[in-house]
């Protein structure tokens, strides 16, 4: 067994390859969305074709910010806390340290949520105020009232604090659970297979095995959604609806994970492979 610490993430390689994968997803989604709207609304292809470049460009901008920030924050936090530990044996990730993963992920989520909130704290009230004015002129009293209530909520410090703290706790708990679930799967010979090479002081991810990666991520999603489904059933949600939601979530997670691995293997030789510092 070779237990290694994830000391740092190469910011440029992580941002470039992650953004590239996200752009491929955005192209697929925007094309499907454009076709769907075009079929539902005849003779509208010319007017909705702008959706494709809009979605792709928005994805590029948001992903550069997100992935750059996440990798930078990890590098900072890993020096303040204990870095994430990986047990890698024969190119199989056998174990991921849960506590370090949950702690660092929770801190990253908290910082990102605060940054995004403060960035939009001035824009959201301005947008909602303009929307209320337009709806009042258009005699849309009910919609204006709803927008006003939303404006009130977004200005309420208690609501904001509860929303931020709640989202951070929920995401951190789910990441912690996902790590424990992965470790159980990996002990059952369902660990993620990676091909790694050494390049100077950095370790380079050469490729991912698509089906293996899809099974691991899909299984984690399935178990997490079963837990959520049990809570929903206890809360009164129909069992059939819950089962459909669980199965759909598994299928989507599996397909998405397989595509991520395929896209990584396709793009990495062209735009650069992910590099990390493992010791």
Image (tube, rainbow, N blue to C red):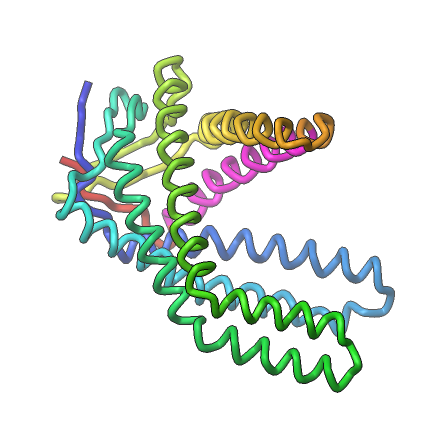
Q: Is residue 164 magenta?
A: no
Q: Look at the magenta stretch and give its main secondary structure.
A: helix
Q: Which residues are magenta?
A: 244-269
Q: Is residue 262 magenta?
A: yes
Q: Quadrant of residue 106?
A: top left
Residue at image x 43%, y 48%?
167
Q: Is residue 39 visible?
A: yes
22 horizontally vs 198: left or right: right
Query: In the rendered view, would you say 37 is above or below 228?
Result: below
64 horizontally vs 238: left or right: left
Picture coordinates of residue 72, whole percent (x, y): 25, 56
User: How many dots with numbers?
Assistant: 0
Picture coordinates of residue 43, whole percent (x, y): 85, 69
Q: Quadrant of residue 236?
A: top right
Q: Is residue 199 visible?
A: no
229 horizontally vs 154: left or right: right
Residue at image x 47%, y 28%?
220
47 horizontally vs 152: left or right: right
Q: Nearer the viewer, residue 159 or 29?
A: 159
Q: Residue furthest right?
A: 42
Residue at image x 18%, y 53%?
76
Picture coordinates of residue 154, whole percent (x, y): 50, 67
Query: In the rendered view, would you say 239 is above or below 129?
Result: above
Q: Quadrant of the C terminus?
A: top left
Q: Residue furthest top?
A: 188
Q: Quadrant of the N terminus?
A: top left
Residue at image x 41%, y 43%?
171
Picture coordinates of residue 6, whole percent (x, y): 20, 39
């Amino acid at each position: 067994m070779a237990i290694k610490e994830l000391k740092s993430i190469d910011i440029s390689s992580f941002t470039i390859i992650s953004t590239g994968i996200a752009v491929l997803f955005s192209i697929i989604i925007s094309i499907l969305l454009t076709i769907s709207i075009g079929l539902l609304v005849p003779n509208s292809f010319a007017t909705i074709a702008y959706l494709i470049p809009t979605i792709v460009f928005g994805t590029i901008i948001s992903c550069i910010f997100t992935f750059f920030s996440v990798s930078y924050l990890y590098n900072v936090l890993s020096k303040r806390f204990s870095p994430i530990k990986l047990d890698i044996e024969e190119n199989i990730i056998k174990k991921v340290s849960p506590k370090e993963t949950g702690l660092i992920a929770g801190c990253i989520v908290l910082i990102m949520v605060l940054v995004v909130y403060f960035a939009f704290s001035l824009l959201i009230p301005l947008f909602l105020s303009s929307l209320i004015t337009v709806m009042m002129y258009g005699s849309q009293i009910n919609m204006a009232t709803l927008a006003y209530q939303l404006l009130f909520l977004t200005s309420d410090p208690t609501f904001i604090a509860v929303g931020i703290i709640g989202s951070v706790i929920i995401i951190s708990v789910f990441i912690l659970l996902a790590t424990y679930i992965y470790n159980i799967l990996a002990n059952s010979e369902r660990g993620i297979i990676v091909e790694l090479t050494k390049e100077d002081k950095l370790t380079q991810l050469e490729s991912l095995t698509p089906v293996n990666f899809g099974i691991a991520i899909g299984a984690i999603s399935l178990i997490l959604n079963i837990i959520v489904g049990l809570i929903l059933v206890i809360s009164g949600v129909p069992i059939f609806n819950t089962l459909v939601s669980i199965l759909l979530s598994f299928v989507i997670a599996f397909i998405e994970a397989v595509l991520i691995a395929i896209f990584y293997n396709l793009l990495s030789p062209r735009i650069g492979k992910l590099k990390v510092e493992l010791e």
